Amino acid sequence: MFPGLAQRPWHAFCRFYLQHHATRICHGWQSGGGIRTLWFNFPDSHVSALATGPIRFYSNSDSRKNGSSASGPDKPSTSGTPEKPTANNGQSPSASVSGANETIQVKVRAVLKKRDYGSRYTQNNFITAVRAMNEFCLKTSDLEQLRKIRRRSPHDDTEAFTVFLRSDVEVKALEVWGSPEALARERNQRKEVEREFKENLFRNQKLLKEYKDFFGNTKPRAGKRTTFLQGPGKVVMVAICINGLNFFFKLLAWVYTGSASMFSEAIHSLADTCNQALLALGISQSVRNPDAIHPYGFSNMRYIASLISGVGIFMMGAGLSWYHGVIGLLHPQPIESLLWAYCILAGSLVSEGATLLVAINEIKKSSKLHGVSFYEYVMQSRDPSTNVVLLEDTAAVLGVILAAGCMGLTSLTGNPYYDCLGSLGVGTLLGTVSAFLIYTNTEALLGRSIQPEQVQKLTEFLESDPAVRGIHDVKATDMGLSKVRFKAEVDFDGRVVTRSYLEKQDIEQILNEIQLVKSPEELENFMLKHGENIIDTLGAEVDRLEKELKQRNPDVRHVDLEIL
């Protein structure tokens, strides 16, 4: 039966003839104190059969070679043929073989039978009040009569919340609606009402707006108003006003002079005004609160608006400037007096420079607050709206200088080709700015990682906790606007978690419970009770780590710790 024992002449083994064949039998040898013990593990259903089944003992070596006589029935020879049973000093056959050198004892260990978890076992699952009312069409008054269970809350703002047993909710739903068919009909009717509501959502929103306009909107609007009075919103609003005036005056100068460079500058100012209006829309949308469809909020709206702005600059600004410059080279036209054009360019230089200084000051303040340099802040596109204003105004100042220089060469030499080259130069400048904006905002929308130094800092904080053995698969993604999402797989130390649970328990009571355990069923109940509590303790440890991680690193807004 055990091939490995045939090569050990001093071992003896036994074969059990059971009324029912046992499965998943484990065996092994233990030695100590001159006694070698052969042990077996049987399923609990075969323990009773083992007590009544006959036991035969065999030896793989001749007793005369071992210098001892064996007691018990059926002592075979080395060939495996059973020998006749012999008595040993009148003793009856037993479950032990006595020899001069060694004694073999048989021990039987009972193990719990593997439980088959069916669909009914899931009735012990918990369900929240919201799901109970939505899925089983119940009211709050119906839930008040059910058993309430307090569980650890998954949210940061509450410590515990009330749940119900799913089996109780199902029974209550059948009691309220009478039958599963009636409950199914009610669910279908509610789904139909919900579908009709979604179809009429636009009409409902319009009626709600009319209601607010008539009775007054009680919801505070200070949040969006203050958005454009400070920070990036203030920079964008200043840029919209100045670029709008610049476009108007440059357009008059182009109509008066017919200069290709002046036309390019007018188009440049129009593109800046439209793009910054788009940025203002993105800023107003980014401060919206998260909802069920967008659980992580709308902070990426600034990057989307900046990306569209970059594409608009390329198409409207660079494209029209190149087109007008090429047309001027192919069909040169004489330029009228440029005096008014110079005056308007000088005014644009002053206004664009003022907007540029506002953007520079805002970026300096923000970069100092985040502890990075001015260059890193711009290249990482931490504030896309301010970056767009900075780059557009930088291109505007350089474009004014380039246009004025080319117009000056045209007025000195009388050659209109210099003015057309100025238009091409402004278009190239706008194309470069738009390419940079498209690249940086695309990188931000793809979800790039934060700096390695910051990732190392977060990892070291978690690894320094006593309950953590190791951190794996760390991902820290910049969600935009200084919001970081941190994810890691954590290998917890079960001993520390268990000690944390025991520190909150009455040890004397647990010892008394252990002493009362006399059967496998009682042991199972004991382990299930404390095992569930230890799992709750592990969940509390996860919540503690997430909370401390957010407190020490304000940029980390979302933490996902997975138990390894």
Image (cartoon, rainbow, N blue to C red):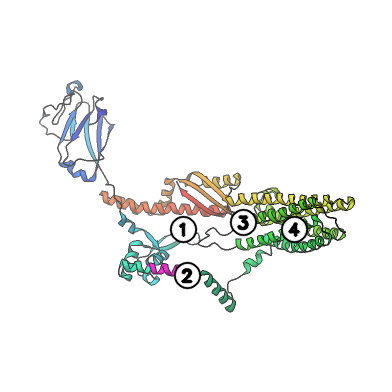
Q: Nearer the viewer, mark 1 or mark 3?
A: 3
The local secondary structure at tag 3 comes to helix
Q: Is residue 527 magenta?
A: no
Q: Which residue is mark 4?
A: 267
In the picture as drawn, the residue positioned furthest to the top comes out as: 65
Q: Nearer the viewer, mark 4 or mark 2?
A: 4
| x, y percent for residue 323 | 74, 53
Q: Which residue is mark 2?
A: 197
In the picture as drawn, the residue positioned furthest to the right comes out as: 412
Q: Which residue is mark 3?
A: 304
**Callout 3, which amino acid?**
Ile
| Above or below, 126 relative to 70 | below
| Among numbered discs 4 and 1, the one appearing first in the sequence | 1
Q: CA distance from mark 4 to mark 3?
A: 23 Å
**Callout 1, which amino acid?**
Pro
Q: Residue drawn at (15%, 39%), measured in percent from left and top?
A: 53
Q: Residue drawn at (68%, 54%), measured in percent from left and top?
A: 315
Q: Which residue is mark 1?
A: 154
| x, y percent for residue 273 | 71, 61
Magenta segment, which residues?
A: 187-199
| Above or below, 307 relative to 162 | above
| x, y percent for residue 330 | 79, 50
Q: Which mark is residue 4?
A: none
